[in-house]
Image (spheres, grey):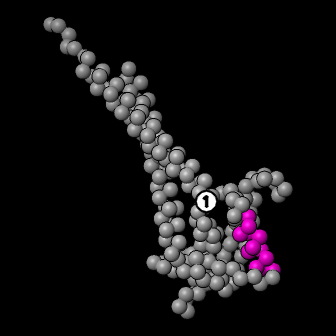
Amino acid sequence: MQLKVFVSFFSGAVSLFLGLFLFANFYKVVNDYLDFSDGIKIQIEDLKYLNRKIIAGGENAAGKYIIEVKYLYRINGKAYEGNRVSLHNQKYLFSSLDEMYHHLLLSKQENFLVYCYVKKKDPSESVLDRRPHTFTMLFQLFLCILGIGMGLYLFFCGYYEYVSNRTNYTLPDK
């Protein structure tokens, strides 16, 4: 019986930890979205570096890749360097980031205008694409609710099992 209690406690604690971790990440993305939604739109002065780095799959396959970028912008005469493409720091490429990559590539070749969004509170933080990826955010919210709910359920099942076994013990007769 004690193994059953331990497994329930342990799996509940792990599920709860994962759910809280996912919630913290979800909170960060929502908080960033709110900060950047009323941010300042600034034209980029210089696109210093642009690279599409393949992580998995091939160039022609639907592989995973990330966009690495460095850009320069000015606020009130002070120069800042940004490197963040999206609110989501995922290791796979969304279609909107694919569009962003091609737009950045064209801007580097043909001098298109590119804008970044800067937080009012901290002008050193900027992002090129401030649109939220709704499906990713909802899926992440679902997983964190599932993890927290399952963790609490397993944790309390283990606690109930522990308490019910503890009270059923009787002292031996003398």
Quadrant position of residue 58: bottom right
* Residue 102 in the image: above or below residue 9: below
Crowd tier of the residue under label 1, counting other residues whose Cα lies within 10 Å: few below 14, some 14–19, many 20 or above: some
Tell me if residue 96 can be seen.
yes
Residue at x-position 71% and y-position 82%: 113
Residue 153, magenta (yes or no): no
Q: Amino acid at mark 1?
A: His
Whole-percent x, y for residue 103 in the image: 75, 73
**Magenta-drawn segment:** 98-109
Whole-percent x, y for residue 112 in the image: 75, 82
Q: Foreground: 93 or 49?
A: 93
User: Which SS does the magenta portion mostly show?
Assistant: helix
Tell me if residue 10 can be seen.
no
Q: Is residue 128 left or right of residue 107?
A: left
Quadrant position of residue 83: bottom right
Residue pushed farthest left?
A: 174
Residue pushed farthest right?
A: 60
Residue pushed farthest bottom?
A: 77
